[in-house]
Amino acid sequence: MARYLLRRMNLFVATSLVLLAVLFIATHHFPVEIRFALTGIHAPTVEQIAQIDRDYRLESNQLGQFIGYLQQRVTGNLGVSATSQQPVIDELAAVLPASFELAIVAAVLALLFGIPLGILASMSKNKITQHTIMTITLTGYSIPVFWLGLTLSLWFGVQLGWLPISGQLNLLYEIDPITGFVLIDTLLSDSPYADSAFIDALQHIILPAVTLAVLPFTVVVRSTRSAIISIMDKTYIKAAEARGLHTSHIVLRHALPNALIPVLKSLGLMLGTFASYAMIVEVIFSWPGVGAWLVSGIYQRDYTVIQGGVLAVALIIIFLSIMIEVLHTAINPLSRKELYAAN
Amino acid sequence: MPLLDIRNLTIELDTPHGRVKALDKVSLTINPAEIHGLVGESGSGRSLLARAILGIPGHNWTIKADRMLWDGHNLLEMSSKQRRNLMGSDIAMIFQDPSSSLDPVIRVGTQLVEAMPENKKLPFWRRNADKKKTARKWLHKVGIKDTQKIMSSYAWELSEGECQKVMIAMAIANQPRLLIADEPTNSMEMDTQAQIFRLLTKLNQLQDLSILLISHELETLSIWCDRLSVMYCGQIMESGPTAEILAHPYHPYTKALLNNIPHHTGQIAHKSIMRTLPGSAPTLQHLPIGCRLGPRCPRAEKKCVIRPNLSHKKNRYFACHFPYQEETCNDDTSASS
């Protein structure tokens, strides 16, 4: 197992190196002066120029420059934002929790509703139920997220006026960030309005989370359904039936654990799409997350923010895909069987 | 009254090549406390018959039968819930491929405990421990010594034989009245095979367990079974008490099977041709009409394109137009009849 983890670790490091190399090359092609692209400092003084040249080894060859770039980025120096002149890493730390909050809520929603509905779709003998569920999920899968987000905010936000359509929390509430997750912060806060702030935060997260959850939800329903249908034909399910076990027991104890393995795999494959959808959703609902921040950075030609955002998002996706694979191995005894053979 | 009484059971499979009669008017009677052997080649529909009796049909099956009585109750009219209640408690089955009959992601012990009968007298918090104890006891009985190791393993970590023993333990733990054993010992060593058969016979004698023993080895079946049914290509060829069938087979197929058994007397000439029927068993897509043995049968005649009905002679049944007679074989009389 240790050897396996080491190999995954190795994969993470190698992929990150490739990512940094791509970013390094892209930085040199930005249509601005290289020192500005690297650090984001507007009008550097002579000392600053000397410092930048030393830090990024701008006097040496390309490889030397790449090593200097690596050193700076890996130690957490992402430069300063060209527009706000704040360190990019601080801004990133401020926006990341909001994105995570949105993504976690959306993923929980998708799994919470997707898995039972997938089971229902696979177990139902009724053709109408099956086709209805399949039609709904196919529709959800093909709806463009920007249209869905705008339509939902138009219906529920503007016309019905039920839910707020932008931001994370009403500006009236002043909640000190502790964890960065507003839902948790409002609960932890000792402000007299903490309870109503929590409800307000909940209302704010509903629309963006639902919009973002639609795609993974449909994928979960469809993959759960196909996995369970194929598993219900396996001999061990027939054998469990022959032991006289109850159908619900068979589905929950025998079919579902087997079915979740391919579901997990399809979720892992979907991470990239999920991240780009999250960015769009954040922009639509003005969610103060990394996506909205990155998009505004792009509009403002803020090269350091673009680099920092792309680096952070890509690293997170790489890390999560590898984590999902490790998790897949950890919870799936069958893949450990293959691991046995490999080592 | 027979425990299980099946008349003219037909199973049709929907295949890409159209509908195929995999079982053609099969009749089978199992009396209480009897070991009934079902012999046939692989692909002859033995497992289909077993699954149809148990009530776990595949999704492309069409099952028709004149009657299918379990202890006087019509199995065909039962709801799936009633059938499920019979399974495990009254009818149990040992599957043919043991390692794929165990859930790969759950430990063997958990599955074993799941199948154990619940002791209703104990308070509910002690029932699980009790089930575990019963599970160990049954594992011991089927010849597994290191029960702890087996129970904490996954199915794919065990050998085929060990899986098979676990499946047998699961099947007999609930003390069913009918045990369908589909090749229960095909991946075991000879002495373990004998041990398992002794265990089954003991259960049969002490607890009146009826067993439908499915195998392709006529030799093994002839040792352990009271009655035999011979199946070929989804048709029952012959059925009757083992000793009588062995002594005087009526059906050419049974006779061919008996001829196949090597005698180990060393009297067969070196490199002599094995005495088998010509040709090979037809596939499901190319089944002959009438008696399915027809094209391979040494006694086949024009009449054999009509399916022979199961005829009855004392306590023996056979489906053949030209059976071997008990008296010294007289071809002239049998051919003209």
Image (tube, coloured by chain):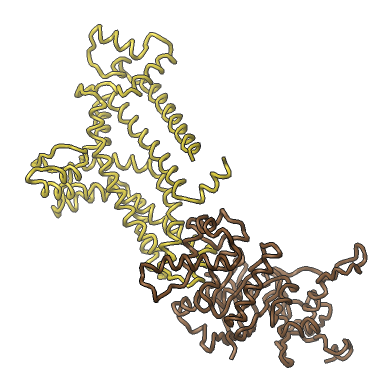
Chain colours: A yellow, B brown
Q: Is residue B179 left or right of residue B43?
A: left
- The total number of labels drawn is 0
Q: Is residue A91 left or right of residue B234?
A: left
> Residue A82 in the image: x percent, y percent?
23, 22
> Residue A338 in the image: x percent, y percent?
55, 46
Dividing the picture into quadrants, the one containing residue A255 is bottom left
> Does A54 appear above or below B142?
above
The answer to whether any part of residue B21 appears in the image is no
Which part of the image, by quadrant, shows the C terminus of chain B? bottom right
- In the image, farthest residue toward the left: A192
Dividing the picture into quadrants, the one containing residue B268 is bottom right
> Does B149 appear above or below A329?
below
Which residue sits at x=43%, y=26%? A17
> Residue A206 in the image: x percent, y percent?
21, 50
Which residue sits at x=71%, y=85%? B240
Q: Toward the viewer: A223 or A249? A: A249
Which residue sits at x=40%, y=67%? A248
Q: Is residue A243 left or right of residue A170?
A: right
> Residue A34 in the image: x percent, y percent?
33, 15
Which part of the image, by quadrant, shows the N terminus of chain B? bottom right
Q: Toward the viewer: B201 or B211? A: B201
The answer to whether any part of residue B152 appears in the image is yes
